[in-house]
Image (spheres, rainbow, N blue to C red):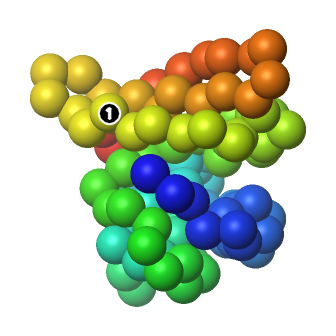
Amino acid sequence: VQFHADLFKAIDAVSPFCKSKEGAPSKFIHFQNDKLVSSKNENVGASFGLPTLPGGMAFDYELLRAIEPYFENVVVVPAHQVAHQLFFSKDRVRGVLMGAHGD
């Protein structure tokens, strides 16, 4: 998966507005088709358009920020029995970030 160059700019813009579906503060940021959103509820929070962004995933935005320096080669494994998995690597660093089913 090729992620948009502005992914981390979008995370910075949207994360202050992250809320759960019920409106409580949340650390999860949601990937929807072609946009990053701060809540599953479309009437709450903020969004940032990112063409080609895959949908149906949620990740802890603080963990995404932490792996930014290593976010070069990225593979997303869709959820089946477990949450989405985002494998990343750069140079000699490799890791995986587990997604969330909900917030």
Tell me residue 10's x, y (percent). 69, 71
Residue at image location 52% in from the left, 57% down from the top: 2
Residue 31 location, quadrant:
bottom left
Tell me the quadrant of the picture where the C terminus can be found.
top left
Taking depth in this image into account, of 31 and 90 the one nearest to the observer is 90
Residue 47 seen from this side: no
Q: Position of residue 74 (x, y in %)?
A: 55, 39
Crowd around label 1: few <14 · some 14–19 · many ≥20 (10 Å): some
- The extreme right residue here reads 69
Please tell me whether residue 14 is drawn above or below residue 91 in the rendered image.
Answer: below
Asked whether residue 52 is in view, the answer is yes
Residue at left offset 80%, top offset 23%: 91
Q: Residue furthest left?
A: 80
Which quadrant of the view contains residue 100? top left
Residue 42 is left or right of residue 69, and the answer is left
Task: Count how many numbered circles sit on residues in the image.
Answer: 1
Above or below, 50 relative to 57: below
Residue occupying the point 40% across, 85% down:
43
Residue at the disc numbered 1: 77
Whether residue 83 sits left or right of residue 89 in the image: it is: left
Asked whether, in this view, residue 11 is left or right of residue 41, the answer is: right
Q: Can you tell which quarter of the image residue 41 is in?
A: bottom left
The residue lying toward the viewer, choosing from 60 and 44, is 60
| 43 in relation to 21, above or below | below
Amino acid marked by disc 1: Val
Name the residue at the front extreme: 91
Q: Please provide percent x and percent y for residue 7.
A: 67, 64
Secondary-structure class at tag 1: strand
Vertical placement of residue 29 versus 98, above or below: below
- In percent of the image, x 56 and y 59: which residue is there? 3
